Amino acid sequence: MTDVHAPMQQGKLQNYNSARGANAYKADYRNKLHRKLSDKRERALLERYFAEIGPVDTILDLPCGHGRLSDFFKERCKTLLEGDWSFTMVSLNQQDNGNDHRHYVRASALEIPLPDQSVDVVVSFRLSHHLESQELREQHLRELFRVARKAVIVTWFSATSLKNLLREVRVKLFGKTRKNVLRNQRVRDVAAACGFEQRQAKPLFVVGSGHVLGMFTRR
Ligand SMILES: C[S@@+](CC[C@H](N)C(=O)[O-])C[C@H]1O[C@@H](n2cnc3c(N)ncnc32)[C@H](O)[C@@H]1O
């Protein structure tokens, strides 16, 4: 596999793939207040979404990073598959969380090495906004829907979020770079074309974040 399989801005990708970057990401969630708050809110929403989905056998968490949500997912399935493009993230995760009913794989979320409908729930948190073209962001969504038998839970950066609207002003006035966004309606359209229906789409926070956590179930 090459970087073509993980087309994130090269600096960022190298950072996640380095021991320093992977450990720094892990430390952020222990030390930084905004990270702790977003982690708490994500877990609260996930709790609700999984209650709606009901019991499942298998969950794929891709990208899993250092395994921030590994224990949460493990409590909700019989077998958890943890995947990430970064070898370093995968091994840090395995070192911290062990192999009991958990499997680890180095994989790209843009070409998931699993058959159609082979996992009950596919979760993909905090990747979409790193993918640098609309085409890749949609390819990512289609891969998740292809592999999921029952449900997909995915985050994206919303084009209509307050945070993005303010960014667009700064793009026009100060030449700032654009965010890697998706329109909520476009996400619903891609889901529908793959046989899925949106059940939930809650903002992480209305102010201060543009991330949306969506939950989709197969029709
Ligand atoms: C912001 S972290 C999110 C990790 C985890 N989902 C979380 O919420 O804590 C982004 C992760 O995406 C991984 N990544 C980047 N491109 C990828 C790709 N194409 N496929 C799979 N993982 C990728 C990085 O290595 C990094 O671990």
Image (tube, rainbow, N blue to C red):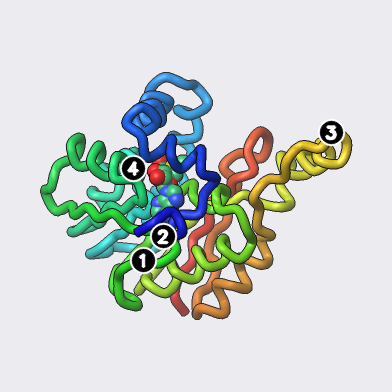
Q: Determine the secondary structure under disc 3.
A: helix
Q: Which residue is mark 1?
A: 112
In the rendered image, residue 135, in percent from the top left (x then y), is placed at: 61, 66
Q: Are marks 1 and 2 in contact (CB under 8 Å)?
A: yes
Residue drawn at 36 percent across, 27 percent down: 20
In the rendered image, residue 121, in percent from the top left (x then y), is placed at: 35, 64
Image quadrant in which you'd find residue 59: bottom left
In the picture provided, is 200 more to the left or to the right than 92? Answer: right
In the rendered image, residue 182, in percent from the top left (x then y), is placed at: 65, 57
Dot 4, crowdedness within 10 Å: few (<14), some or many (≥20)? some
Residue drawn at 34 percent across, 54 percent down: 61
The numbered mark at residue 174 is 3
Q: Which residue is mark 4?
A: 69
Q: Is residue 111 above or below residue 180?
A: below
**Mark before the other along the chain sequence, 3 or 2:** 2
Asked if the beta carbon under badge 2 is closer than 8 A to the nearest atom of ligand 1, the reply is yes
**Mark before the other along the chain sequence, 4 or 1:** 4
Residue type at numbered disc 2: Ala
Dot 1, crowdedness within 10 Å: few (<14), some or many (≥20)? some
Residue situated furthest left in the rendering: 100
Residue type at numbered disc 1: Ile
